[in-house]
Image: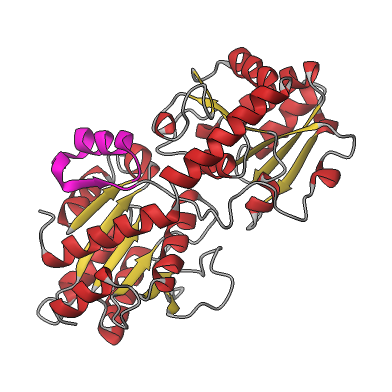
Amino acid sequence: MGGGGRTNAFDNPNSGHSVKIGITCYPTFGGSGAVATELGLLLAERGHEIHFVSYDQPFRLSHFHERVFFHEVEMEDYPLFEHPPYSLALAVALHDTARKHELDLLHVHYAIPHATSAWIANEMLAGERDLKIVTTLHGTDITLVGLHPSFQAITQFSIQRSHGITAVSEFLKRETVRDFAVPADRIEVIPNFIDPKIYRPGLEPCHRATLAPGGEKIIMHISNFRPVKRTEDVVSVFARINDKVPSRLVLIGDGPDRPRALIRAEELGVRDQVLFLGKHTSVHELLSCADLFLLPSESESFGLAALEAMACGAPVVSSNAGGLAEVIEEGRSGYLLNVGDIDGMADAGVRILSDDTHWKTLSAAGVELAHERFSSKRVVPQYEAYYQRVLEGTTQ
């Protein structure tokens, strides 16, 4: 595709031209996979051709969509390999997809191992295609995995070899500059986003009667239940709120700390008020029923679950950690407390749930903030503009 076609595609998405983009993400439940999939679908709606490449179909890619294709990474069991080399299999799949479908750009979400595999694929294509690589950093690929001694050097190498680098928050950009020696001017901050048509208040049918049959307030938490999410704190905060405002706690997601959260509920005598729903693909239907969203994480690079809750009208009480302060406006759309401040979070929750006027003010502000600052209509064009700069070679 020539330079003129690329320019027309981004200047006028309905012009009939399209940029061919390969997207790699983790297909499992989690923020990076959700954002990557939604981005691909919205880019396809804007006229671009999208090729997802992963070991499984992304969990939000559940229906047929025009101009959207999925390529599964083939993995073969071989007795020599105790752990099959997924990163190499992914590199081969990216190389093959780029060649067969004449991709212009690879957009990989999560540095390890995706940025590394993309670099290998590009090296294999040397002389055949001018394939550009954009790496989006989401959080634990930098703050946890990438800092491990076994991965720090390859993470730094892979990020620096990308033609374009984006981070989902200013916090994550600062962490990357500090820990991986990436020049600040090479990282573009493009936030996570929501589709206001999907994440909005008042969705019908509402599940409130099922979740809270006694008319209790509904407090919600969504995560992958890893230690960094502090799900035992979620239960502890809920128990204190429930002492003053009759409530039900709805837990969505799954992970290693699920048993600890349920044990904590037993210890505090609130197990009967806790509903554990497991993994759900349509969390917007549940969030629209929430009166309060809790996110007391040790760290969040962005806090997509908090944004989705705000967009659905639920005020958020969270820790003031990582990039959460870039999503939640203290006192306007929710409250930010110190990590581990269970009493403070509980007091904030009681204040919100016991004052209808205050709740409505916070709810309306959260919806406005989410739908204006973090709307897909605002953020997706930022990616398109960045892609254009990458394709023109003006990002370095």
Give the residue displayed 24% in from the left and 47% down from the top: 188
Up-down relation of residue 256 to residue 318 (above or below): below
Q: Nearer the viewer, residue 65 or 159?
A: 65
Secondary structure of the magenta portion, mostly? helix
Q: Residue 260, image x and y in percent?
A: 67, 32
Identity of the residue furthest to the right in this view: 214
Is 138 situated left or right of 265 in this image? left
Q: Give the image quarter of residue 217.
A: top right
Give the residue displayed 30% in from the left and 55% down from the top: 382
The stretch of residues the image draws in magenta is 168-190
The magenta stretch spans residue 341: no
Give the residue displayed 79% in from the left and 17% down from the top: 243
Q: Residue 339, image x and y in percent?
A: 50, 20
Q: Would residue 334 be seen by someone viewing this image from the given angle?
A: yes
Q: Give the image quarter of residue 5.
A: bottom left
Up-down relation of residue 266 to residue 283 (above or below): above
Q: Nearer the viewer, residue 146 or 393?
A: 393
Q: Nearer the viewer, residue 360 or 326?
A: 360
The magenta stretch spans residue 187: yes
Is 31 situated left or right of 105 in this image? right
Q: Would residue 232 be seen by someone viewing this image from the given angle?
A: no
